[in-house]
Image (cartoon, rainbow, N blue to C red):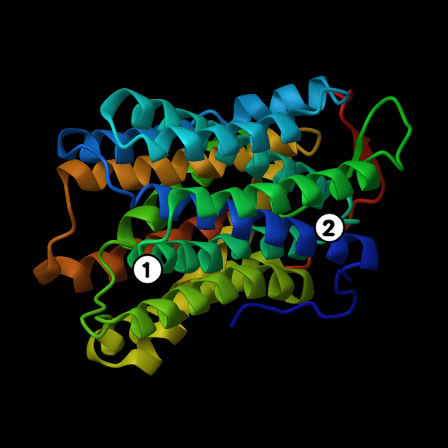
Amino acid sequence: MLPVQMMNPIRMNRNGLETGLLYWLVHFLVEIMSFSLLGCKMPIEIVGLTALMFDALAFVPQAFFGLFIQKFRKVDLASIAVAMLGLSVIMFAFETTLPVIIGVVLLALGNAILHEYGAIETVRDSKGAIAPSAIFVGGGSFGLVLGKFFFTLGISTYFLLIPVGLLEVLVLILRQRSQRCDCEQESFPIFDYCRPKASPVLVIVLVIVITAVRGYIGYAIPISWCEGFGDFLMLYFFMGTGKMLGGILTDRFGAGNVGVVSALACIPFLILGANNTFLSVIGVMMFSMTMAITYGMGLSVIPNLPGVAFGATTIGLFIGTFVTIFFKPDKSASTVLVVSMSVLCSVLFALVLKTGLGKKKKGKVSSGDSI
């Protein structure tokens, strides 16, 4: 049994919680738009292309946008991103090839930029807790469900201009909150999840690998019970809850403990839950808890670059999704994949992460400091 250090849990401050919840709403609204628009009527010959293009542009360049946001703090890139989302709605309304492709590009890039703002600002306000970032990320699962629901209703594309307006209101609120810090350089709390001898380059590579593995086996999880919209809603409800709960538990029990245990504990639930809704969603929730840990791993080795650390996880997610195009998980081998890949993730966590709470270091690091 892993030793659990419970003496000094990392507590989430009020400001961090508020930032996490505000970015939960941002992520929620962005995913409503994304999955409503990507399900819209479009020329059949570009359906596959648009899905791949969206994933590539939404996931891969996030680290670059994170660097830009931190380097040029006075540029209101968030409002530009919202404008891009609004223009994407108009482009999708044409339902012809070129406007739809332009719409996909705008939608993906706006999505990526707002993700990076959420990643950076939830860390900035966290005081060392990973929970605010986990709360922010969890909002996407709930938005995905509602977006697909709106698509099935056949609502007008222009209806999605309402979420655009709400997003701009949230961006203005968050912009005002971030301006409370008048310092020339942003400062970020120190995360200390990794073992002292862990190479920063190796850790970032492992962040990408673990996230890619998690993304890939997500397609292998046996969920024959998931048929109607109610089942789909329950699946993603527990997925989003797992992402948020993973951050909260990591602050309480330590990244190493939560990472190893959740990666192993999800296995029996996922395998035995192939035809059992309750067991399956519990497994999915445990499986989703590791998201916050991979982000925290990146923050531990590049604390002054939270956008790049988050970008490493989204690159991994793209790789895991992209691989399924060529090597789609076989249902007959799903059990082997889930078990082997989950064990692999658990072993990697055990090798790299500390088993304590990971907050021995004190202080902050500014965005101008060296890595």
Residue visible at 19% across and 34% down in the picture: 48
Residue in front for this viewpoint, 282 or 46: 46
Residue visible at 34% across and 82% down in the picture: 278
Q: Label 1 amino acid? A: Leu
Give the x, y percent position of residue 126: 75, 49
* Lateral position of residue 271 relative to residue 311, left or right: left
Give the x, y percent position of residue 6: 72, 70
Residue 326 quadrant = top left
Residue 232 quadrant = bottom left
Q: From the viewer's perspective, is residue 252 above or below residue 106?
A: below
Give the x, y percent position of residue 69: 66, 24
Residue visible at 14% across and 35% down in the picture: 44
- Marks 1/2 in contact by CB < 8 Å: the verdict is no
| Upstream in sequence: badge 1 or badge 2 | 2
Q: Which residue is mark 2?
A: 19
Q: From the viewer's perspective, is residue 346 above or below residue 235?
A: above
Q: From the viewer's perspective, is residue 69 above or below residue 140?
A: above
Residue 286 visible in the current orientation: no
Q: Label 2 amino acid? A: Thr
Q: Secondary structure at mark 2?
A: helix
Q: Secondary structure at mark 1?
A: helix
Q: Which residue is mark 1?
A: 153
Give the x, y percent position of residue 297: 57, 43
* Lateral position of residue 332 relative to residue 17, left or right: left
Q: Which of the two discs, 1 and 2, sits closer to the camera?
A: 1
Residue visible at 29% across and 70% down in the picture: 270
* Lateral position of residue 363 relative to residue 59, left or right: right
Alpha-carbon distance for marks 1 and 2? 32 Å
Q: Residues within 10 Å of mark 2 (few under 14, many from 20)?
A: many
Q: From the viewer's perspective, is residue 201 above or below residue 156?
A: above
